[in-house]
Amino acid sequence: MKLKLGLPKGSLQEATFALFQKAGYSFKVSSRSYQPVVDDETIEPILLRPQEIPMYIEQGVIDAGLTGKDWIADSGAKVHEICELRYSKLTSNPIRIVLAVHNDSPVQTVQDLQGKRIATEYVRLTQRYLDENGVSAMVEFSWGADEVKVPILVEAIVVNTETGSSLRAHNLRIVDTLLTSTTRFVASDEAMKNPWKRTKIESLEILLTGAMNATKLVGLKMNLPKDRQQEILSILPSLKNPTLSTLTDENWLAAEVILSETEVRELVPALKRAGATGLVEYPLNKVIY
């Protein structure tokens, strides 16, 4: 038996493969192929546009996949959400689905778009948003490059943005945020009713969330003199309890702790000044709570 797994092709592809690599799975794909190869014979992966993954899962064509909350919302597909995976092509921050207009536009609220034209990939999501706000406007599907269409072809666009840099570069401003989205690991109801597939999906959840947890964490080892133990350990954050072990020299201890990368860069100099030696920072692949 195999698990048919949909993976997002496009901007998220490399970040997705990197996450699976940390989880213990190696994916390889040629530049023109939609059928990756993975070092797990029980997984049958296929690269799909993230917009398509919710629909194929709902229809049972594939068993599970990774896609954005935005595309689940836009499609209206009924899927079983396994977990949230907060990663993207640039940062670990959520993306926003926003309504944007040109800086010179008189539009200040969505109500100002009554009778106007809006271009977007998120046609159904945008239409529902307009209906909820009592606005009648023409929503047209766009294949991309929406920013260049304002204000020559349309009065507004609904697009996703991670940093807002592309909008600013095209002299656009955000009027409203429709949705905040992160990547979700989802499955079909049919797959979750199959004991083998459910177990496989739950195993992937454990490994993927473990890899996500480790993304911004590192391990830190150090040696410290016993007579300065409390002084040195007091420098560590109060919620971080290091593992202590004895060394052959009875006057010294070895300490090991997991910290965020930002904490380490602040703490290492202070620990060194307090008398810690042999400080070693090392990367982590998975942290499972």
Image: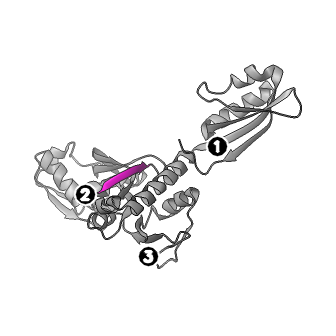
Residue 156 picture location, percent across and down: 24, 54
The residue located at (84%, 29%) in the rendering is 252
Give the main secondary structure of the magenta stretch.
strand
Q: Residues within 10 Å of mark 3 (few under 14, many from 20)?
A: some
Q: Is residue 220 above or below residue 115?
A: above
Amino acid type of the residue tagged 1 in the rendering: Val
Residue situated in front as seen by the camera: 138 or 72: 72
Residue 30 picture location, percent across and down: 52, 77
Q: Going by the picture, which residue comes out furthest to the bottom?
A: 32
Q: Are marks 1 and 2 in contact (CB under 8 Å)?
A: no
Disc 3 designates what residue? 34
The answer to if 119 sits in the magenta stretch is no
Tally of numbered tags: 3
Q: Residues within 10 Å of mark 2 (few under 14, many from 20)?
A: some
Q: Which of the labelled discs sits on residue 78, or is there none?
A: 2
Q: Going by the picture, which residue comes out furthest to the right?
A: 249
Name the N-terminal-most of marks 1 and 3. 3
In the rendered image, the quadrant that contains the N terminus is bottom left
Disc 1 designates what residue? 218
